[in-house]
Image: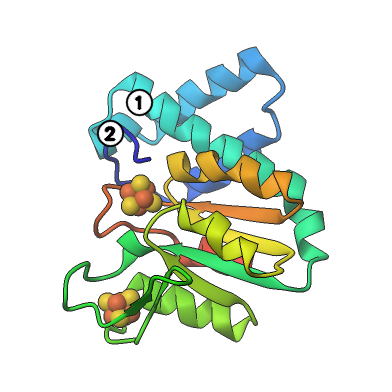
Amino acid sequence: MPYKFTFDLSKVPRVLFTEIATVSYQKGMHKSFLDRLQRIIIKFRIQEATGLNFSDAIVLLQDFIDLQAVNMIQRNKFLQTKKRAVFLSHCSRKYLDGRCKAAFDPDIPSYTCCHCSEDCLVNQGSQLAKTKGYDVFVVPGGSCIPKILKNTHYEGVVGVACGEEIKMFGPFLTSIGLAGQAIPLIKNGCANTVFNMETLMNAL
Ligand code: SF4
Ligand code: SF4
């Protein structure tokens, strides 16, 4: 399920995400948390950078903070897992049409990247994850994840998708005892979407 708005935080200074991580520690402190969130939106000129109205900017950053908080809670459990997989969002492929040479297997269901373009984020993310010993799935939607997990025995998963999509499937992962790390997209829109490679590298 996509957000009802589009956003692009890929040009916003990376220090925004450092602040988000810091604020995640304060989540319990309701009043100061909201004040801090508002200050971040003003400081990083999120509305000007993204064209979002104030309430959508709040929703977006709140999701980043919530997901970061869950990542922190899950981190130790995740680090103890042995068998892990990465789920990449298909919308981050360089091409979504026939120029993408990835093979799609409906039985898994997942794309397998054929590395046709060096500057494709899915290509880079796939190769990075494989060198770290992860199995990689490039999924056309979150609904594929339960089907894949039913036939595998992973202990830990890293998921790259927009925050809305991650929020929808996070509780499912927790319910089956998997430790997860979430990488929310920094540019959405269901095509040419962007995730931060450094964030993925740190999570892996
Ligand atoms: S590098 Fe892989 S995912 Fe990207 S467009 Fe080519 S085949 Fe598709
Ligand atoms: S932005 Fe990507 S992950 Fe989010 S709903 Fe669209 S296709 Fe799915």
Q: Which mark, by number, is residue 56?
A: 1
Residue linked to disc 2: 5
Tell me the kind of residue under disc 2. Phe
Residue at 70% in and 35% down: 25
Q: Is mark 2 within 8 Å of ligand 2?
A: no
User: As displayed, is residue 152 above or below residue 112?
Assistant: above
Secondary element at tag 2: loop
Whether residue 8 is visible: yes
Whether residue 42 is visible: no
Whole-percent x and y of residue 1? 38, 40
Q: Quadrant of residue 26?
A: top right
Tell me the kind of residue under disc 1. Asp
Whole-percent x and y of residue 175? 72, 44
Q: Among all residues in the image, which is located at the extreme left?
A: 98
Q: Is residue 122 left or right of residue 204?
A: left
- Camera-side residue: 21 or 15? 21
Whole-percent x and y of residue 55? 36, 20
User: As displayed, is residue 43 above or below residue 13?
Assistant: above
Cα distance, mark 2 to mark 1? 8 Å
